[in-house]
Amino acid sequence: MKLYKKESVQYVNASIEECWAFFSSPRNLQKITPETMGFQITDFDGKNMYAGQIIQYKVSPLLGIKLPWVTEITKVKDKSYFIDEQRFGPYAFWHHKHFFEATANGVKMTDVVHYGLPLGILGRIMNTLLVKGKLTEIFAHREKMVNQLFNSK
């Protein structure tokens, strides 16, 4: 399986406490995800992120087909980073690191996603034709929404 990497950096005009409070709540994920993804949390315990937390979703990444997606929050360091990993879903491998760093002007947020697709050569073709572009769209939408929520003050 070939692994791909998607990395993004965004500066947020907020304190580390404000940023962490927003991003460590699974409830807020839907606010920054494109509506076209059909993203819906179907089960989680209502708590802010902690290591071992399981979150279940439905997503419609392509053609409106609803797929289950289960992630586990595997590591959390308060106001610093958290990691989510797919346990079941559309990817053969998904490992997403979210870093938060206080700066003089707010918070530097860095996302690093490593992902792999099933189906060998067909997965590589799908990445080139669809998946890479879809992930770029999702992160661009997220940047826009975070700007609206935090950087337009």
Image (tube, rainbow, N blue to C red):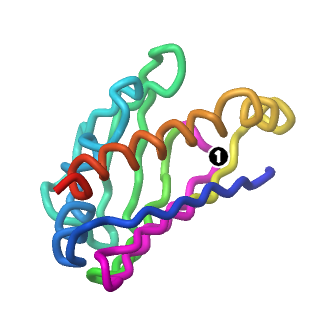
Prevalent SS, magenta region: strand
Residue furthest right as drawn:
121
Residue 120 percent across, percent down from the top left: 82, 38
Please name whichever residue, 152 or 70, is drawn nearer the observer in this view of the structure. 152
- From the image, tell me which residue sits under label 1: 92
Quarter in which the C terminus is drawn: bottom left
Residue 41 percent across, percent down from the top left: 26, 39
Please name whichever residue, 97 or 1, is drawn nearer the observer in this view of the structure. 97
Q: Residue at x 21, y 51 (%)?
A: 149
146 left or right of 27 in image? right
Question: Is 47 part of what is drawn in magenta?
Answer: no
Residue 16 percent across, percent down from the top left: 24, 78
| Rendering quarter of residue 90 | top right
Residue furthest top as drawn:
63
Q: Which residues are magenta?
A: 90-112
Q: Residue at x 22, y 70 (%)?
A: 14
How dense is the environment of label 1, judged by Cα within 10 Å: few (below 14), some, or many (20 and up)?
some
